[in-house]
Amino acid sequence: MISQVANHRFEQGRGAQFNPQNRFLKGAYVQEFPEGIDDWEQEKRHTEYIYDDSKTLVNKVTSPDVGMFYSANPYQGCEHGCVYCYARNSHEYWGYSAGVDFESRIVVKKNAPALLRRFFDNKNWEPTPISLSGNTDCYQPIERKMKITRALLEICLDYRNPVSIITKNALVLRDTDILQELAKRNLVRVFTSVTSTDESLRLLMEPRTATYKSRMSVLQRLTAAGIPTGVMNAPLIPGLNDMHIHDVLKAASEAGAKWAGYTVVRLNGAINDIFKDWLFKTFPDRATKVWAQICDCHEGKVNDSRFGNRMIGDGKLAELIKTQFDIYTRKFGFNEEKMEYNVADFRRPRVGQLMLF
């Protein structure tokens, strides 16, 4: 059931339109009768940054579906505000809502560089690619000021540990110099997430991200700089952007991307209500059909947690999406080269320096 708070307003520039109840909290402060309270969140909410001294940074990824073994996220929550984002649920572990809180209350792990150095210095660590933005975007707006992601890349270069990046922000171009040095040693891959080529859809679905044209420019400029790139056409939402697969992959190929991947949208946890509220407000003429098609991809539900199925769905519609994607990846020459990183040159420079004394 969609909350009453979700039904009485639409805020431009936001993905989520309300804060659903945090499943870990017993109580909630809610507006029962919108018409009776004049000053309830009438002022535009500004982004709040919560600076945290975290205990850990690198997480082992146990899912076989996501193509990564370890991830590191310097920020929790994401100002980009993508309404479908699977990372929204993780914000509840910090005591916030997966809705508006997720995109307006950003946790900044200010000690992330020190944590990464400590992690690499552990004698039990065997060099393995670490993914930046396995959960939230490491190049969201606050990175321009904090430069934590840049520091993490410098550390990966220092230790010669491979790293992958996925982002929707053109700010990644700022770090071209470090990425070039990593690329010379076969230590980096940069993926750009592109959901469509329809800019009007992006403004509604991903309100604070870089334009699609800008993202293609990122692929083009990084490729020209000798940095291996790929594209994630994800998530594909039947009835909204699944018809744009050809155009996305064609443009990404022309920009120089070598690899391509996709996922089918799944709406687990609080994202169910957040996305449904947004969908019926934004596309009332086709919301029912889109919702039904999402269900068709997950055996009558909008979420399937089974490994092997949850990211690509199943059923006839999911199979049609997969077939289209496979046809166009072959047509445009994606995934012909195996993605292998250099793990042979890993070193512990500070440990070596200490040994000199």
Image (tube, grey):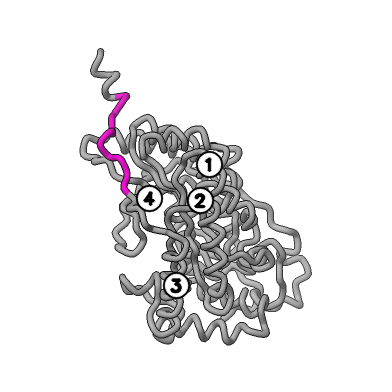
Q: Which residue is mark 3?
A: 268
Q: Residues within 10 Å of mark 3 (few under 14, many from 20)?
A: some
Name the amino acid, label 2.
Answer: Gly
Please state the horizontal and vertical placement of residue 84, each as a whole percent of the image: 53, 68
> Which quadrant of the view contains residue 248?
bottom right
- For the residues labelled 2 and 1, the Cα–Cα distance comes to 8 Å
For the residues bearing labels 2 and 1, Cβ distance under 8 angstroms:
yes
Residue 328 seen by the camera? yes
Residue 92 seen by the camera? no
Locate the C terminus and report the quarter of the image it occupies.
top left
Q: Which residue is mark 1?
A: 224
For the residues bearing labels 1 and 3, Cβ distance under 8 angstroms:
no
Outermost residue to the top: 357
For the residues bearing labels 2 and 4, Cβ distance under 8 angstroms:
no
Q: Which residue is mark 4?
A: 71
Q: Residues within 10 Å of mark 1 (few under 14, many from 20)?
A: few
Q: Which residue is mark 2?
A: 256
What residue span does the magenta drawing correspond to?
340-350
Direction from residue 63 to residue 96 in the image, left or right: right
Residue placed at 43% from the left, 35% from the top? 113
Asked which secondary structure carries label 4, the reply is strand
For the residues bearing labels 4 and 3, Cβ distance under 8 angstroms:
no
Dot in front, 4 or 1: 1
Name the amino acid, label 4.
Answer: Ser
